[in-house]
Image (tube, helix red, strand yellow):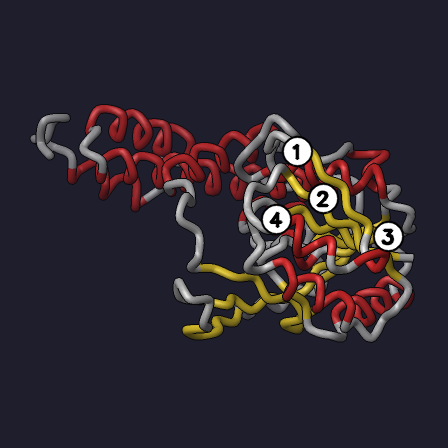
Amino acid sequence: MVSVVIPTYNRARFIAKAIASVLDQTYRDFEIIVVDDGSTDQTQEKLESYGDRIITHSYTPNRGVSYARNRGIDLARGTYIAFLDSDDFWKPEKLKKQMEFLENHPEYSIVATQCLVNLIDEDLNTIKYLEKNELHHELTYAKIFQRPFIMPSSILMKKECFDVVGNFDENRRVLEDIDLYLRLAQKYKIGFINEPLTVFTRGHEKDRRESLEVRCNRLEVSEKNYNPELIPKRLYKKRISSLHAHIGKHYIRRGEIQKGRQALTKALAVDWRNVRAIKHYLATIGKSDSWM
């Protein structure tokens, strides 16, 4: 019934825990598809030890997580698809509770779960767990547009959804998941289980992209997927203005005052009531790009 797609790239230290969390699921009707996105560490050796318990697809060179997830979708034989990033893991009841949700609520085609953040140190020891307290029963388009907090590893969805909205955008290296969720939310009802059944790991990344790039991509994704029929105009303006303001703030922190002012001006053009944008703009008075 369920195809579990695990994209991986140089995650030899994590992949075993991810796979083990799937093998330990109380729901047993699944297949595991691991797509190795050109790893150069010992990931392949780790995968070979599982034999026929998993399906492995490998290729080179590295092409990005969207490409890897899409190859997993192509290989999937299940009616449903669940994604699991190779540095994350699941609680044993995760798939069972999601399948029960979809069976009990046939009007939904997708369901996500609440997550725990597993904050680790360089030796992979857990520093602490951070819980995200979300209370939504349904993740509407408007909610995702305003606060896209869904994690890829928490999603379970009908495979047929991809035939309607398309797969992950392989040209997008940042926020490819949010782009997909906004497309899905325009066509399908997305449920939410308010229980931390998914654990995603943070603290080990050495090359995480800076917030400015993320904010710029978030703005692009939001404007690309804007549907005026599904979100009130005032909420759209508030969100877009907020993103422009954050971009402006990041430019100012980098000492690029002119670019910062331009972004803040756009924020106020969209929503003149954005107090944060006004505050940041006033703070640039008398400063120039040489200020830093």
Would you call the spot at circle 4 few (<14 residues within 10 Å), some (14-19), or many (20 or more)? some
- What's the distance in space between the residues labelled 1 and 2, CA to CA? 33 Å
- Give the residue pinned by disc 2: 35
- Give the residue pinned by disc 4: 144
Mark 1 and mark 4 lie on one chain; the one further toward the N terminus is 4
The quarter of the rendered structure image containing the C terminus is top left
Q: Amino acid at mark 1?
A: Asn
The residue tagged with tag 3: helix, strand or loop? strand
Please tell me in which quadrant of the rendered image residue 156 appears: bottom right
How far from the left and from the top, in percent, is residue 131?
Answer: 52, 71
Mark 1 and mark 2 lie on one chain; the one further toward the N terminus is 2
Between 141 and 57, which is closer to the camera in this rendering? 57
Instruction: Identify the residue shown where x is 88% and y is 42%.
Output: 160
- Of the residues tagged 4 and 2, which is closer to the observer? 2
Mark 4 and mark 3 lie on one chain; the one further toward the N terminus is 3
The residue tagged with tag 2: helix, strand or loop? strand
- Give the residue pinned by disc 1: 227
Q: Amino acid at mark 3?
A: Tyr
The quarter of the rendered structure image containing the N terminus is bottom right
Residue 80's label in the rendered image is 3
The residue tagged with tag 1: helix, strand or loop? loop
- What's the distance in space between the residues labelled 3 and 1, CA to CA? 27 Å
- Of the residues tagged 1 and 2, which is closer to the observer? 2
- What's the distance in space between the residues labelled 1 and 4, CA to CA? 12 Å
Please tell me in which quadrant of the rendered image residue 90 appears: bottom right
- What's the distance in space between the residues labelled 4 and 2, CA to CA? 28 Å
How far from the left and from the top, in percent, is residue 272?
Answer: 35, 35
Please tell me in which quadrant of the rendered image residue 194 appears: bottom right
Q: Amino acid at mark 4?
A: Ile
The residue tagged with tag 4: helix, strand or loop? helix
